[in-house]
Image: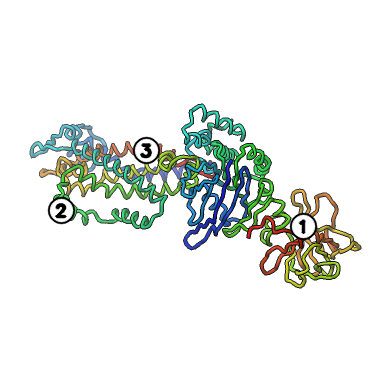
Amino acid sequence: MTTLELRNIVKRYKTNTVLDDLSLDVANGETLVLFGPSGAGKTVLLRLVAGVIDPDEGKILIGGEDMTDVDAEHRGIGMAFQNFALFPHMSAHDNIASPLTATRSSADAIKSGVGKVAKLLKIDHVLSHHPKALSNGQKQRTALARALAGSPPLLLLDDPLRNVDAKLRFEMRLELPRLLASQGATVVYVTQDYKEAMALGDRIAVMANGKIRQIGTPEEIYNAPADIGIASLFGDPTINLLDVTPQKDIEGVYVEISKVRVALPGMPDSVAGQSCVIGIRPESISFAKDTAKGAVPIEVEAETPLNEKTVTLVLTVGKREVLVSRPAGTPGPVSGPAHIVIDGRTAFLFDKASGALIRKAGTAQQGVAA
Amino acid sequence: METTSTLEKSLRFLALSLVVIFFMFPIFWIFLMSFQTNETILQIPPSIVFTPTLSNYAALITGKLTTSAGTLDIAFMRNLGNSVFLSVTSVALSLVLGVPAAYAFARHKFRGSEDIAFTLLSFRFAPPLLVLLPLTQYFQWLGLSDTYFGLIWVYQLICLPLILWIVRGYFEDISADVEYAYRIAGHSWFATFRKIALPLAGPGIAAAGLLAFIFAWNNFVFALVLASADKQPVTVGALAFVTSSGIQYGQIASAIVLSVTPTLALALYAQRYLVEGLSLGAVKG
């Protein structure tokens, strides 16, 4: 167990700034997920921490010690690569043993160390195989086992589930939290899959363009995304985003969607008249009778099943597309005109110009990076 | 493997046979010539029916060449020994120098690295004859002419660029992540070079070494100018068979057979490793 601190890291390739004055703290024993689209700088950041590339500016502290100029082999890190990066000329056993041979452990210690971690990852029956004789899932487990074998206090996992099939990814997503907890290591986990991020992270750092846009617990990020971009990265189906101009009356702030009033309780009065984007999660919308309070008339366009949900694409009177999701098996209109009710309590308002979240009155700026 | 029709198979066999005959016939003919006397070689029409004789090989091995004008001393076996010594030492030196250099060029982009690499390659562009005249002068001043050391040095012009550029390509093909993984596991860069980069580039190093060996073995002009009889390789030594009393075709043929044998044997031996290494599992599944 150890801590990781990054202080004002800058990394440039020629004129392209990949990491831009980035700072980050990972607590002892915490699993931090680095989440963001490709090109956000996640992998570069991980490699800087591992020590295989050097930052142009800034400091890297591991366990409070400045490791910026320390070679990769002396940082005491375990790392699993997206493409596995197994040593093709060595057996799975020798691959996993590589962190142990580096410390000149005795043959017995190596054997028992490899055996233990292989058993944990259920690959003890293929230890004599070379990587080319392993299935993708076994390769991925071998790569993980290699990262874990030296019991490193800091574990870096670079999208380890990227190159495995959906079934295996699901299994590993269930298995990994327990595995990581059993190691007690501090973990930095890179992924592009928001479900993985939500399932594995104690905290999630959302990256884009070399900066951390928001850092917080999965709930914080889902329930208070710092801007439009983050809101649309989390959630499947994606959040509905509609241009609106909020108004205010005696009952509070509201917006009009297809001339129907949708109340936004708790929004500050100052947003009235401001150009905004409203973000409504598909699960915050439900079908209703036309007599229901706040029923918005719509036209049903198409319906598609998505895992355990049914997603319906509907058109408002103004021809704006809106996604509605409901648990699979519950009844709903299949075509033609219908009505929806929007739960304004869970909707987000973003400033249209800057894209930033407009916070509800009385909530703190907690957990948001600048 | 998909199934092929009998017709396709026989056509393929025919085409392959033609290619093999086209390329192998001269070698086959030389092989036959090496067992004939000058008289049977020069008879018209030529015949593949003859009484084989080992006199050509005997002459080469004993070093006594009997011609109509008398007996000549030839140093063929010594030439052969020189060839082996020069080629093996040159390639070994090139590997020791070239493989680490290739790794440096592949993995570390430093200022001017491309220029240096290209300069080394450009040695292969220069016509040897153009280089030879000044080189002869320098070698005389330095006392290097007619020494093995001098020849091996000049042979680096042939071997080093070849090894450097071929092996560099193989190093570049190894995923950097694989090497990073070994570093992160706690091994020094030198251990990574030895345990990861070298074995993975092994087939490439073998191929480059083999090619360099063949080029060094076949070199003629450097040794012709820079060495005297007792340091010359077979390529130059074969000139001795062009005598005042005629060309000794039989001996030339057997000399060729003898001088081809080491390279051929090496190629056949190394081939196994070349193919085997190239099919090692890739990084991704």
Q: Mark 2 — residue?
A: B137
Question: Residue under mark 2: which chain is it in?
Answer: B
- Mark 2 or 1: in front is 1
Q: Which residue shows up at 67% across the image and 41% down it?
A: A171
Q: Dot 3: what SS? A: helix
Q: In this view of the protein, which residue sits in the foreground, B279 or B29?
A: B279
Question: Residue under mark 1: which chain is it in?
Answer: A
User: 10 Å neighbourhood of mark 2: few (<14), some, or many (≥20)?
Assistant: few
Q: In this view of the protein, which residue sits in the foreground, B166 or B181?
A: B181
Label total for image: 3
Q: Which residue lies furthest to the top in this view?
A: A108
Q: Dot 1: what SS? A: helix
Along the horizontal axis of the image, is A306 left or right of A138?
A: right
Callout 2 amino acid: Gln
Callout 1 amino acid: Pro
Callout 3 amino acid: Ala
Q: Mark 3 — residue?
A: B270
Q: Is residue B201 visible?
A: no
The quarter of the picture where the C terminus of chain B appears is top right
Mark number displayed over residue A282: 1
Task: Give the CA distance from mark 1 to mark 3.
Answer: 65 Å
Q: Are marks 1 and 3 in contact (CB under 8 Å)?
A: no
